[in-house]
Image (tube, grey):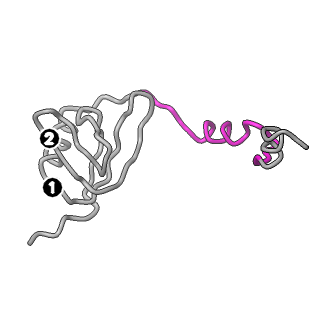
Amino acid sequence: MMPRQQRAYIFQAFDALKGFRELLNEKERIVVEKRELSEDDLEMLDQQIHEVQQGDIIKIIYYDGKEYIQKTGMLTKIDLEVRYIQIVKEKIDLDQIVEIEIEEKACEE
């Protein structure tokens, strides 16, 4: 009889080119330097941040320290004093946001 651990190896997924998927995923990433926004861009961004409301579906682009990420989702919280915005469960530093767009306004009752 074959040992249990050895039998488990038989049923593992077969990846003919080990690491190939990871390499493809890395190849699709384009890492760019963080861009500095002009005073006009910062003013417009500040205005847009003050227009969004909890429940809005928003699309933002932010810098995570390595690359720019685009995220779309429901705005669940915004805290201007602590300077973060929360989309669903992910908190994002307001100072890292470079673009923000309201996709769908929350229903007002």
Q: Quadrant of residue 2?
A: top right
Task: Tell me the SS state at disc 2.
Answer: strand
User: Residue at left 10%, top 34%?
Assistant: 81
Residue 57 or residue 89, whichever sits in front: 89
Q: Pick whichever, 45 or 23, lies toward us.
A: 23
Name the spot of residue 100 as percent of width and height, x first: 27, 48
Which disc is residue 53 wearing? 1
Q: Residue at x 16, y 69 (%)?
A: 107
Classify residue 80 as left or right of residue 22: left
Is disc 1 placed on a helix, strand or loop?
A: loop
Q: Earlier in the sequence, mark 2 or mark 1?
A: 1
Q: Residue at x 41, y 41 (%)?
A: 69
Question: What residue is shown with label 2?
Answer: 79
All told, the count of numbered labels is: 2
Quarter occupied by the N terminus: top right
Residue 106, percent from left and from top: 18, 65
Q: Quadrant of the C terminus?
A: bottom left
Residue furthest out toward the bottom? 109
- Kindly report the distance in space between the C-alpha atoms of the residues bearing marks 2 and 1: 11 Å
Range shown magenta:
12-33
User: Magenta stretch: residue 29 in it?
Assistant: yes
Q: Is residue 31 left or right of residue 54?
A: right
Residue 32: % across, % down: 47, 31
Mark 1 and mark 2 in contact (Cβ < 8 Å)? no
Could you say which is closer to the camera, residue 21 or residue 47?
A: 21
Quadrant of res 20:
top right
